Amino acid sequence: MKKLAALTVLLLGTTVFAGNFSISGEKDDLVIKYNDEVLVKALKVRAPEPFTKFDYKVLPDGSRVWNAWNENPDNKYRREIALRPDNCVEITLSFDVPIFTEDRLRAAYMHLPYEFFADGEYQALTTNGRSWKPISGTFAANAPSKPFPDRPWRFMAFEKGDKKLIFDFNPIGAGDYCMMYTGGAVRSVWAVERKGDEMVMSIGTNVPVANDFTGMKVIIREGVFEDYDKLHAQRSFSYGDAFKPLALYSFGDNVVGGIYTPNNLRSYSVRNRAGWVGFPELKTYTASKEGAYYSHMAGKDAVFRRSNLAPGFYIVTVGAGNGSGTANNFSLSVNGEELERNISVKKDTVHVASKTFHVGKDGVLDIKFDGEFIVSAIGIQFLTADAEDFFFNRGFWLSDGFEPASIYRKNDYSKKPVFKLASDTFTLPQAGKETVRSKNNIKREICLPDPKSPELAWMPTGNWFKMLSNSSSLSEADTPEKADRLIKSKIEGKNYDAVMISGMHSRHTYINHVQRGIDAIKVIADAAHKYDLKVIDHHDATLCWNVDAGLRFLGENLQEASRNTDTLLPSYQLCPSDPDFTQRYYAYLAELVKAGVDGFQIDELVYWSVGCVCQHCREKFYEATGCYYPVNELDKTVNQFDSEIMRQWHEWRTAEIANWFVGLRKYCMPYNKNLVLCMYTTHWGFTRSHPRYKSGSCMFELGRAINYFGTEVMTRNPLMTYRSLLPYRRMKNVLNLSYNTPIWSWIYASRHPHIYAGWAISNMAKQVALLPDLEIKSGESDFFAFDTSKENMPRTGVNAHAKAALLFSQASRDWNSGIGFENELMGLAQSLDAEHISYEFICDNQLNSKDLAKYSVIYLAANTCISDQAGKVIKEFARNGGTVVVTSIAGMNDEMGRPRKEWLFKDVFNFVPRVNSSGHKLQSVDGVKLAEPLGAWALAGSISEKSVKYYAETVNGVRVPLVLEVPCAKGRMIYVASAMGAQLWEREGNLKSASRSKDFDPAIDQFYRKAMSEAAAAGRVWSTNAPEKVVTALWSNEDKIYVHFFNATGVTVKGGDKVDPLAPALPYPALTEDISFTLKAVKNGKVIAYSPDFTGGKVLESTYSNGDLTVKLPKELLKVYTLIHIQQ
């Protein structure tokens, strides 16, 4: 009874001091003081109901903790305020917001007296942890009542006289990549504002319906802005970055990279903070003049010390390269804990050992070498500061108590971490001779399910919807009742075939939730299958961002981590080559398949640009290519994307990732032989040069295992970007041609007119559009219903009704040099669209006589990288009666981008583009003056006057050939000396970048379209009087020809204009004239128009003569989108 009475006194009215902070008050009326002056006079929480329960306790370490909570299942939440013995105040909030709760606003407000801050100075970090953006200012006494600038803030240090305080709004640190998310995250981005006589610090969110969790944590302590680096390991964090070392020392006497600090014989002192303890006898051995691992120091029984470290967890790496064959046998320990035992580095090998260790308050890290050792490098990486540790030695809450949410619970982190050794041994190659035994033994196995399998019949026409989000906790729908209700809310009134679910995006970093996640997904899958829905699980495979406990997962599982290319140190990403990773992850995915998952969209299953160069990657690379990836960090070839070693490295990496998916498919075969494996990119991700960006995967390779490809359409306004969108969607169909896999597009847009445009253009490309939720209002066209009706074109069994092909060469995309690849090719495609010339893209896979037989015209555009065999096929195509259009220096390189000794088409044209010449500057083409000079290639060789179709005039008044045509047996080849398509390229603009850098030159536009139309003459399958901005597409099968029309006449794009997500003001103006078109060499048949814009089919007037069918489409029947069926 006495204990209870004492507790009551404490709860209701005590004042407790910890250093200079104190807390007084009771229940929800707590006041925080600093040096007896009120600092926080109220902490208010915005929730549908108030706290109903309160608790106060003193923990064994002396912390004094006030808890308040509400256990109502519809409004569970908890607040903890702790006065810690380390002289700081920790405030924590967690909310559970069931997804069908209507009131979803949750917020916290700290009310502070402005007088406390008046005329004080502040330094803060603005925005989120993805960047380091310090700001500074003054809390002026006369500051107006409004937010302080550059909000939100994640960290703030305040100084006023003797007051030096830190408000750490992001105590978990920058590694929490999702700190600004409105749901599923611990929000750490605060607003700071003056409101009258108060300073109000606030954070809040309307929790999205896809999430049930939000939380926050803030710590107030004494300190200055410069203390940030003691409190946090990372100043900023991006999940694809390398894990930069806090220190990286080299030991030897050769030249090393700038990232290393040579230490060599330097002894430790308090002043220099790093060196050998005492004066051990050390000797240097060097095998090459440069590269840290080509030299080492040798000695016996020594200690290397680094001091002045912030308390926390560090990854320590000790590496040794033994090019000289120095005898060695030794063990390593760090601060008395074992790193690795009985190491013996053989001649011409490298050994690196990494492990996670804790450094205490003394800030000392001692690395002890026992035995006869060699050392080339020591790396120290700051993983987590003790001040931001909420997942190693303690949990999200300081005290035990009510847990409102399914994630960020105290017991999730109760099990003490166990840090595993990451130990790699690999060959130290002879410097400069890494490629002398080059070979090509890259395995490219294909493992795909039968696309005709009944279980996969839904895919070509399948409609999907998205459920939950990347940051969902997976408890949103973890009971049959919740899952059923959520699915019903999504599918009511719609016709769906599949659902893509997300949640706990990096499943492995939610260290105590893996099995709970599997159980929740089984519940969702069972519910979805009752509605005949396939379930595609979308999550990440390799990220070690600090979402939940990603840095702890990394520290415990270093053997799975990638090793950085320039340091050999572990990084924030996991390595697909690592057998432990592969076995663990294959087994996890198999459990999901057993739980009912029908397919996967696995993100970031790639090799990253910063790695990996671990033992397993190096061994596999050597086995496949006969090459060693350089160990010398100063090797210039690794920074040259087109060096021989990097060509081999890129080819192997992209093939190996596809092989990983082949292995996955085989592993899961006993559980589901028709597993759906999806993969998507953006348009930019598909068209960019993969080697230049060090891309670690390639869709053309992935087609050996992936059976459903997609694209994120990033413009946010498909209508305003129609000119680029349709060609980009056609471009992606090269994967359909190559692998017979369906293609889908993920449309990001809002408002009916823009979502309609995204759907229509995808449909015109024979692709499924994944669309945002949209309620079709009265009077609006229901394109959702049209999509799955019999009035729509089928997406199987139809082919492009076209005889013109544009080459999208994956080799040229990757290795092009001397000219841009994407801008010339896509500018050409957009010009053909403006002329209503039906075409389709092909890729290197179609450069064979069988596939090319269906075409009459091939445009090579600026594809500079063409193999000898493909060159023979292209010339044979022309000799057999085809037309080949070559632009600029197409064919100047081989398929790996190596310059040819002689241009591929010299034997046809009897001239060559002069690649080493500055070329011509044109002032007019075909007699029409240009707005500004245009570059053109100078030609060397014998040029016949009769072969010149069009001339241009240079700025010096010289007449030069521009377009040339030569016969080639039964066909012809056309050469264009200027990349004019690039001048007419409208890139995929967005909210931040313009679609066109400048207005198109009308003279170039008119001439180029005329020249390309003439080149297409033999491949034209139709003609029409449709306006340029009425977009068209043609498909056909044995029974019908399908002609698509889309009305984009309301769109006007000017140079420099960024994409307005709400434009245009009048999306779809009425046409002023009827449209007519004539199909060539077709059968006469019934012509019926269908559209989401009108009900039923409308029979169209048509005439038939000499195999040509002419059709009239009344202007009233093309409002937005119309599809015409022509019976054959």
Image: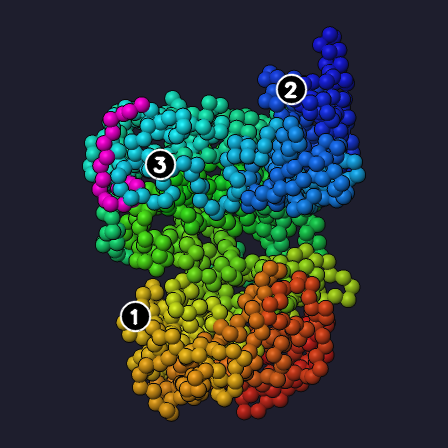
| Measured Cα–Cα span from mark 1 to mark 2 | 76 Å
Residue name at image x 50 percent, y 45 percent:
239
Q: Circle 1 is placed at which residue position? A: 900
Q: Give the range drawn in magenta.
A: 278-294
Element class at badge 1: loop
Q: In this view, does 557 lie above or below 1086?
A: above
Residue 181's image quarter?
top right
Mark yes or no: residue 718 visible. Answer: no
Is residue 195 or residue 806 the one in the foreground? 195
Is residue 1035 or residue 229 the one in the foreground? 229
Residue 648's image quarter?
bottom left
Sooner in the amino-acid sequence: mark 3 or mark 2: 2
Q: Closer to the camera: disc 1 or disc 3?
A: 3
Extreme residue toward the top, this view: 2
Sooner in the amino-acid sequence: mark 1 or mark 3: 3
Is residue 693 or residue 595 the one in the foreground? 693
Q: Position of residue 1020 (x, y in %)?
A: 50, 83
Where residue 249 is drawn, which disc sits there? 3
Instruction: Pick the quarter of the image with the C terminus.
Output: bottom right
Label 2 sits on what residue type? Ala
| Measured Cα–Cα span from mark 1 to mark 3 | 44 Å
Q: Where is residue 342 in the image (x, y as percent from the top left)?
A: 28, 27
Label 3 sits on what residue type? Tyr
Q: Position of residue 434 (x, y in %)?
A: 26, 51
